[in-house]
Amino acid sequence: MDKRVYLALGFLIILFTACSGCISDEQTVVKVVPAGSLLLPLAEIEQEYEAIHPDIDIQIEGHGSIQAIRQVTDLHRPIDLIVVADESLIPDMMYREGPNGVNYTDWYVPFARNEMVLAFTNASAYADEITTENWYSILSRDDVKVGFSNPTLDAAGYRALLVMMLAEEQLNVPGLFGSVIGESFDPDLNINNTEEGMALELPVILRPAGGGKVTIRDASMFLLSLLESGGIDYAFDYKSVAIGQGLRYVELQPEVNLGEESYASVYDDATVYLGFQRFATIGNKRTGLPVVYAATIPYDAPERYEAEKFLTFMLDAFAKGGAGYPAPL
């Protein structure tokens, strides 16, 4: 081949590489921090959005809902869109002044609902026996291991506790909470009955006995991997997550599953007080409420305009729904 051809090819390769770098540099990065239970649908939504907007790079980083908000309020990271599994967390944690003297946000948009279920696999103990009618008695058995996410980091975690508190009361099973969860800690976690309803105060460090009945992981995504490996038999999680992951699940009674708006006055009879000291200034009270997802854009979002465009697209996608998506409002 002529030397001039080699030189020309070399020039074209250099030019192509340089141009590729230019295209990459021109992409606008939009940072989205969602609740872990939304990772599967958001991966699909991201792909669809970027196909339409090749100049936009949607970067998704999943956390428990509390941890998602703390990326902005505690770590002061430049995040463009926050999406959580508990709408009440946004006003509780973000309607306050940040370092710049303005609220982290002063609005949010609710867009989907969900319910708590028990996820399990074919290898779970009593997998062929458990039903909506007997799930609580199955969980009470000594040889059954259960798991939930960390309630100081993840909404699904404190909701698992609320579910068990409500189950003891609404299903009239005295001692149920202790036998399934409370007695796995030292000291025991005990429900206190007050004039306002049932209250559960968590210690600063929530650590179950090693090798015991209960296992806690920081987020449900880590919990489900433990479930699938046989480390636990049952995991408290959202119905959409169980469906999206192809897991078996048992539905819970509407008076305990936190999924029915008509039972809101029943759910709010149970309250969990988070022991994490940082919550002292923003409120550590998590009362039973129907599961509602919500999104907001922080006040100082670097790419507010692009975040608003993606939020609109995302809300439309969740309104249409799909496998593994929480139900639209």
Image (tube, helix red, strand yellow):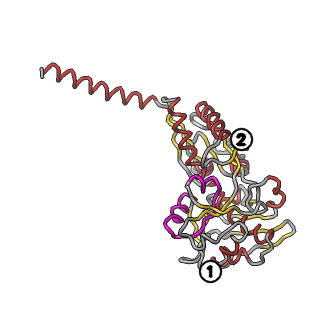
Q: CA distance from mark 1 to mark 2?
A: 43 Å
Q: Magenta stretch: give its range.
A: 221-244
Say if 302 sits above or below 287 in the image: above
Q: How many neighbours does mark 2 have within 10 angstroms: few (below 14), some (14-19), or many (20 or more)?
A: some
- The residue beneath circle 2 is 109
Q: Which mark is residue 142?
A: 1
Query: Along the horizontal axis of the image, is 293 left or right of 306?
Result: right
Tag 1: amino acid: Asp
Helix or strand or loop: what does disc 1 sit on?
A: loop
Of residue 324 and residue 86, the one placed in the foreground of this image is 324
Q: Tell me the residue at 54%/65% (across/down).
A: 227
Q: Quadrant for residue 157, please give it.
A: bottom right
Q: Is residue 302 visible?
A: yes
Of residue 293 and residue 105, the one placed in the foreground of this image is 293
The image position of residue 183, as x and y in percent, is 66, 78
Of residue 205 and residue 264, the one placed in the foreground of this image is 264
Query: Along the horizontal axis of the image, is 121 left or right of 133?
Result: left
Quadrant of the rendering where the C terminus is positioned? top right
